[in-house]
Amino acid sequence: MTVITPPLQELETNTSSENLLARASMSVMDTYKRVPIVFEFGEGCILRDTEGKQYLDFVAGIAVNTLGHAHPRLTEALSEQCAKLMHCSNLYWTEPQIALAERLTQASGLSRAFFCNSGAEAVEAALKLARKFRSADVGPDCTQIIAMTDSFHGRTYGALSVTGQSRYHVGFSPLLPDVTHAPFNDIDALRAKITSCTAAVILEPIQGEGGIRPADPNYLRAVRALCDETGVVLIFDEVQSGVGRTGRLFAFQQTGVRPDILVLAKGLGGGFPIGAILASERVDAFTPGDHASTFGGNPLACVAAQTVLDVIAEEDLLSNVITRGKQLREGLLMLQQRYPDAIHDVRGVGLMQGVELTSPVESIVTECRRRGLLLVAAGANVIRFVPPLIVRKEQIAEALSILESALVQLSSVYHQ
Ligand SMILES: *Cc1c(COP(=O)(O)O)cnc(C)c1O
């Protein structure tokens, strides 16, 4: 008889970071450009690696850890729900899914929710819903989707096809047909692309991966008017900007322009995977059998999201985002004044800020990390600041001071 699994003692149990990193490339696919650090513990805005080194975390799992790490409320709520019921399938109902749908629809002014597990999966649901609605409403040829240049919507085929950055497309053709891209913030270009075959327009109210670029409020109002005129479904991808990051629960509330479909994920579960779409009554065209997700809206994920919403309200985190966002923005603008040769632009809303450098950001990100601050790029020249929404005054000050030291250090290296 052939033995197909190795005996247990042959599996590695050494977990030093050196050993883990040596093992990683043998067993994990090469899809990420990773920093050779292995993290083990987190608390609030602090992460600790297996060597005991601490970092101030201004990445927050890429705008995911809304409440920071190991928030006691989230830990407790998840443990309790785990012991009660983790999963039972959408063949049946659970109270957490219904309650979360009620809260999200009430908060957004939209009508009903569909739950899934990630941003890309939520974008897929939005695209399918838009095509279903428009083909039923107008006709089967009404399939065109207009997305924005420099946008990012995820890595599955539909989401990848609407993503407006060709570097993500290389090697994966053919993409979804009937997708076209218009320049962001250009209403005339969008108007010129809309036809009687258009199903949907999809955009990020603040482009995230594309370099932290907020939409002009007048542009959003004009897009809304154009979609109202033509019946085209307006989709806002708030996977990154949603759930409090801008100082409102959803970024669209800053401008008063409500989409027909709102796409959420990242920060919604505070670190637990969950994605969602919320749709207006007009476009809510799914019927049983149209769409599904095995794990979507499972009680554990829905309790995580409810707890995130609870803590945002109870700890008044939206006020914290506004105050700390202002502190961060003013500090970054000050640095721009001091180092105009290094910093080209500062832009963003609340705790979603970007600093566009005059050179590639990698050396600054690396130097900040060496000094104990975690940052992530958004495109080639932009450093992104998306700390947990619980970030404190002295932590913003510390991040600004580390960034300044890194700028000084690298400019002295360049100018030698
Ligand atoms: C991250 C992101 C996605 C993709 O989310 P995944 O959970 O990685 O699939 C989609 N849209 C936007 C705006 C994002 O920032």
Image: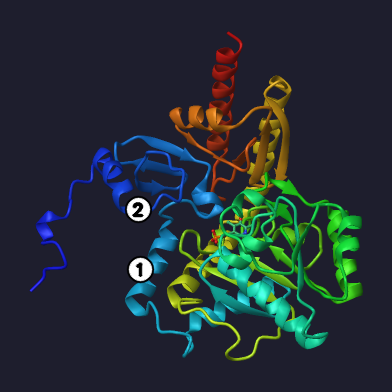
* Dot 1: element: helix
Discs 1/2, front: 2
Ligand 1: quadrant of the figure: bottom right
- Seen in the picture, residue 229 relative to 30 is either above or below; the reply is below
* Dot 2: element: loop
- Seen in the picture, residue 364 relative to 293 is either above or below; the reply is above
Which quadrant of the view contains residue 312? Answer: bottom right
| Quadrant that contains the N terminus | bottom left
Task: Say whether residue 208 is visible.
Answer: no
- Residue drawn at point x = 59 percent, y = 91 percent: 288
Answer left or right for 14 relative to 338.
Answer: left
Tell me the amino acid under the disc marked 2: Val
Tell me the amino acid under the disc marked 1: Ser
Residue 36 placement (x, y as % from top left): 37, 38
Which quadrant of the view contains residue 317? Answer: bottom right
Which quadrant of the view contains residue 188? Answer: bottom right
Q: Label 1, label 2: how many angstroms apart (C-alpha)?
A: 29 Å
Disc 1 and disc 2 in contact, CB within 8 angstroms: no
Please tell me which of labels 1 and 2 falls first in the chain: 2
| Quadrant that contains the C terminus | top right
- Residue drawn at point x = 53 percent, y = 38 percent: 375
Residue 69 placement (x, y as % from top left): 43, 51
Q: Which residue is mark 1?
A: 79
Q: Which residue is mark 2?
A: 28
Task: Say whether residue 119 is visible.
Answer: yes
Front one among 300 and 296 = 296
- Decide: few, some or many residues near mark 2? Use Cα within 10 Å; few <14, some 14-19, many ≥20: few
- Decide: few, some or many residues near mark 1? Use Cα within 10 Å; few <14, some 14-19, many ≥20: few
- In the rendered image, the residue lying farthest to the left is 1
Residue 310 placement (x, y as % from top left): 55, 66
Front one among 303 and 90 = 90
